[in-house]
Amino acid sequence: MFPKLPSHLFPFLILLTLASLCFFSSFLSSSSSSSTSQSLAISNCNLFKGNWVLDPNHTPLYDETCPFHRNAWNCIRNQRQNMSFINSWKWVPRGCDLPRIDPFRFLGLMRNQNVGFVGDSLNENFLASFLCILRIADEGARRWKKKGAWRGAYFPKFNVTVGYHRAVLLSKYQWQPKQTEAGKQDGSEGVNRVDVDVPADEWAKIAGFYDVLVFNTGHWWNYDKFPKEKPLVFYKAGQPIVPPLGMLEGLKVVLGNMITYIEKEFPRKTLKFWRLQSPRHFYGGDWNQNGSCLFNKPLEENELDSWFEPRNNGVNKEARQMNSVIEEILQDTSIQLLDLTHLSEFRADAHPAIWLGRKDAVAIWGQDCMHWCLPGVPDTWVDILSQLILDGIGRTGRL
Ligand SMILES: *[C@@H]1O[C@H](CO)[C@@H](O)[C@H](O)[C@H]1NC(C)=O
Ligand SMILES: *[C@@H]1O[C@H](CO)[C@@H](O)[C@H](O)[C@H]1NC(C)=O
Ligand SMILES: *[C@@H]1O[C@H](CO)[C@@H](O)[C@H](O)[C@H]1NC(C)=O
């Protein structure tokens, strides 16, 4: 091949050839699997533990004009000051960098696939952030509402639907008026019947449609929503459970049954996530006791336990309590934990508080220290979720 080359150059040439082969093949594989190599680095790192770092270059991906906002969470339009400062905090996991979602790349990889959220308004909060971010890659996105969905959007460029199914307890529940002796009903007295083994109609039949699902429940399991005079009464196989279950026992039974249903009825290839509790930040009293969240910056790590550790008995203690119940029941299932609680615990500064877009809202409902301003903390949830989705569908060979 190289008749005029001195023979002592041969080993060198062979090396050179090998090196260029290596270079070329690594180039080829990195261009075809850049998502996998990136997510490998990410999967070595716990995305849920870390710190918020002030970074002036970290700006929101959308603004108050996004058509998928809900007014009460649109803090920029509702003229909360300092929103650009509030949104300059960047979540930095310990040991790696969390990449920002690239909506073009994400939707490109998700072509012809659908993502669903099932749960309470905190999952709607999550959805609204997701829709506003994805819309950057497809301005033709339009409202979508089918199959029991509360709301959602369709992204025509990519044939992707992202929907939210409202099911606050996950299982079916209905108001059951008390029967008086004369057989008449008095609407004001009764119970909330929960069928622990029946998923709510809103999501019972969506199994074939979604490729990714994010479940949650939590904020409705309390005596504000279901006071003692209008209690939750749990039914199984159409009969009241005896002896009657308390609320927390009921939650456990419902979770067990809903998870069994999900595992049985939803295809194995559907990626399933369970979002753990979104913490509230009521300071100085609960929502109906003038509790407030007029904070200008995130809490410090050493403040978190006094706010949230159940044994300190603060008004926001339920998030960690719920999580321990949910985490135990989710063990050994195919459902992946989306543990966004800890990172969100820091962000006492990021709720709509008094900037709700309606003058009388605070007088009626108190401050909102439960949902999140958008743009805001749920945008970071979206960064994490999208990373785990790409990671998950890469692993199951669907990319
Ligand atoms: C805005 O941020 C500055 C600096 O942290 C603070 O002094 C001011 O009180 C904040 N304004 C509001 C309305 O929170
Ligand atoms: C859009 O995606 C669905 C799956 O969600 C698929 O059944 C359908 O064929 C796709 N439509 C087009 C035009 O590719
Ligand atoms: C909340 O504040 C209002 C007005 O300051 C006061 O009248 C009311 O008693 C307070 N409620 C509680 C539960 O502290």
Image (tube, rainbow, N blue to C red):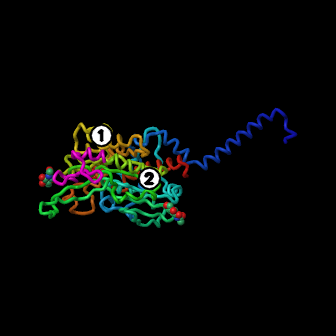
**Residue 55 rendering spot, x and y as whole percentages:** 41, 47
State left or right for residue 105 relative to residue 13.
left
Please report contact status of discs 1 and 2: CB closer than 8 Å, yes or no.
Answer: no
Q: Quadrant of residue 162?
A: bottom left
| Mark toward the viewer: 1 or 2 | 2
Q: Is residue 328 magenta?
A: no
Residue 360 versus residue 96 in the image, above or below = below
Q: Residues within 10 Å of mark 1 (few under 14, many from 20)?
A: few
Q: Is mark 2 within 8 Å of ligand 2?
A: no
**Residue 354 rendering spot, x and y as whole percentages:** 25, 56
What residue range appears in magenta? 224-253
Query: Helix, strand or loop at disc 1?
Result: helix
State left or right for residue 202 relative to residue 184.
right
State left or right for residue 19 relative to residue 76.
right
Residue 264 versus residue 205 in the image, above or below = above
Q: Is residue 248 magenta?
A: yes
Foreground residue, 256 or 239? 239
In the image, farthest residue toward the left: 182
**CA gap, disc 1 and disc 2:** 37 Å
Q: Residue visible at 49% across and 65% down? A: 156
Residue 319 versus residue 183 in the image, above or below = above
The answer to whether one can see residue 200 in this image is yes
Q: Quadrant of residue 150?
A: bottom left
Foreground residue, 170 or 245? 245
Please name the residue that numbered disc 2 is placed on: 266
Please name the residue that numbered disc 1 is placed on: 304
Residue type for callout 1: Leu
**Residue 21 rendering spot, x and y as whole percentages:** 70, 42
Residue type for callout 2: Phe
Q: Residue visible at 38% across and 47% down? A: 260
